[in-house]
Image (cartoon, grey):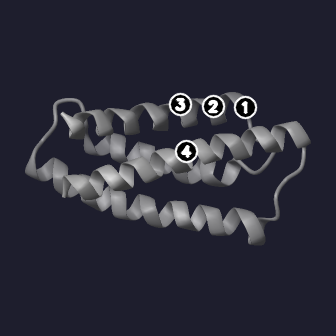
Amino acid sequence: MNDDITHLTKKLLEFNRQCLKYYEKARETGISEDFNDVVKPFANEVKLTIAKWSIEMQKWLKQSPQKHIHIKQIVTTSDHLEQISIQAFFPNTSRKRFLNANRTVEFFLLEIVKELEE
């Protein structure tokens, strides 16, 4: 189970970092990507991974409760990542809001990886 969670968490970290790259590109160019050709396929892939990750995380937390990781954080992280996986492609997305969500996701996912590797 831990291997699955580690793999999925690292995949979400990569998606989160891709979101930041897409966002920076959109801000620099001022161009929004095509929703059906680019945004939707990426967001759907992120959403599927989040769904698998969320289920595995909830099972793991029920089996071995963690001191610093809680179900509410999983829900919040999932919501943030789903939102920024779409917002990343649009240059008019609030910079502060996007970066705050991106950093929150990054921090929490890194904490999970650290916890699993101990």
Task: Name the kind of residue labelled 2 in the image.
Answer: Leu
* Residue 39 against residue 68 in the figure, above or below: below
Task: Evaluate if marks 2 and 1 touch, with contact meaning CB atoms under 8 Å apart.
Answer: yes
Left or right of 58? Residue 81 is: right
Which residue matches tag 4? 16
Task: Name the kind of residue labelled 3 in the image.
Answer: Arg
Say which of marks 2 and 4 sits in front.
Answer: 4
* Residue 116 against residue 50 in the figure, above or below: above
* Residues at marks 1 and 3, CA–CA distance in whole angstroms: 12 Å
Q: x%, y% of residue 89? A: 75, 51
Specify the label residue 99 is tagged with.
2
Task: Evaluate if marks 3 and 2 touch, with contact meaning CB atoms under 8 Å apart.
Answer: yes
Which residue matches tag 1? 95
* Residues at marks 3 and 2, CA–CA distance in whole angstroms: 6 Å
Which residue matches tag 3? 103
Q: Crowding near pointer 4: few (<14 within 10 Å), some, many (20+)?
A: many
* Residue 69 against residue 48 in the figure, above or below: above
Q: x%, y% of residue 76? A: 42, 43
